[in-house]
Image (cartoon, rainbow, N blue to C red):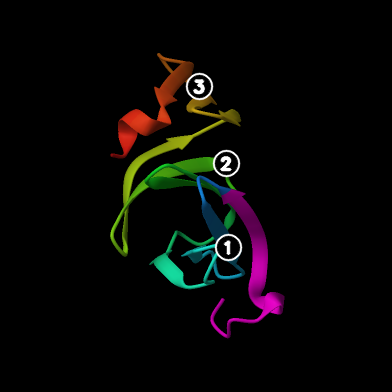
C-alpha cells in the first residue's frame, strides 16, 4: 500500500474489529473500521498473500505456505510464531498440518497474544 491506492492491495480481511490489508509488497496494514486510521503496519516477509486478524494479533500466509502469527501491542506488530504448513484452519484456533515429528499442531489464538 505504498501509494495508499486500491491498486496496491493484494488481499483484505475483516476480523476482531480490525481490517487487515495486504499490499502487493506483502506489507500488512491494520485499519480501524470506523475512522479508517492506520493502527499498525507490519513489513511481513515477501510473498505474503493473505492475513486474518484475531484479538490482539494477526496471522499471515505467504506463497510458500508459511503461516506467521504476530501480536499487536499499540502501533507495533511483532512476529511470535512461524510454521510451514500443508493446511491451516482459523477460528479461535490455528491448526497446522505439516511434516515432521508433530504433524498436527493446534494453538488457541487468544492464548498467544494478550
User: Does 76 sit left or right of 60 as displayed?
Assistant: left
Residue at x 37% of width, y 47% of height: 70
Residue at x 28% of width, y 60% of height: 74
Question: Circle 3 — which element?
Answer: loop
Q: Quadrant of the N terminus?
A: bottom right
The residues tagged by marks 2 and 3 sit, at their Cα atoms, a distance apart of 13 Å
List the single residue furthest toward the bottom: 3
Q: What residue is shown with label 2? A: 65
Q: What residue is shown with label 1? A: 21
Can residue 102 be spotted in the picture? yes
User: Toward the viewer: 94 or 38?
Assistant: 38
Query: Could you say which quadrant of the image residue 19 lies in?
Result: bottom right
Tell which tag, 3 or 1, sits nearer the viewer: 1
Q: What residue is shown with label 3? A: 99
- Residues tagged 3 and 1 counted as in contact (Cβ below 8 A): no
Examine the structure image and report whether residue 77 is included in the region drawn in magenta: no
What is the x, y in percent for residue 14? Answer: 60, 51
Q: Residues within 10 Å of mark 1 (few under 14, many from 20)?
A: many
The residues tagged by marks 1 and 2 sit, at their Cα atoms, a distance apart of 19 Å
Tell which tag, 2 or 3, sits nearer the viewer: 2
Tell which tag, 1 or 2, sits nearer the viewer: 1
Q: Quadrant of the C terminus?
A: top left
What is the x, y in percent for residue 6? Answer: 69, 76
Above or below, 71 relative to 112: below
Residue 59 circle label: none
Magenta stretch in the rendered image: 1-14
What is the x, y in percent for residue 89? Answer: 59, 28
Amino acid at each position: 500500500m505504498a501509494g495508499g491506492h486500491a491498486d496496491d492491495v493484494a488481499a483484505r480481511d475483516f476480523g476482531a474489529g480490525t481490517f487487515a490489508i495486504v499490499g502487493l509488497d506483502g506489507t500488512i496494514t491494520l485499519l480501524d473500521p470506523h475512522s479508517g486510521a492506520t493502527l499498525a503496519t507490519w513489513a511481513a516477509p515477501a510473498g505474503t498473500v493473505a492475513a486474518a486478524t484475531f484479538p490482539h494479533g494477526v496471522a499471515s500466509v505467504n506463497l510458500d505456505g508459511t503461516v506467521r502469527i504476530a501480536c499487536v501491542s499499540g502501533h507495533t506488530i511483532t512476529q511470535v510464531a512461524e510454521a510451514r504448513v500443508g493446511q491451516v484452519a482459523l477460528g479461535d484456533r490455528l491448526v497446522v498440518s505439516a511434516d515432521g515429528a508433530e504433524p498436527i499442531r493446534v494453538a488457541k489464538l487468544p492464548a498467544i497474544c494478550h
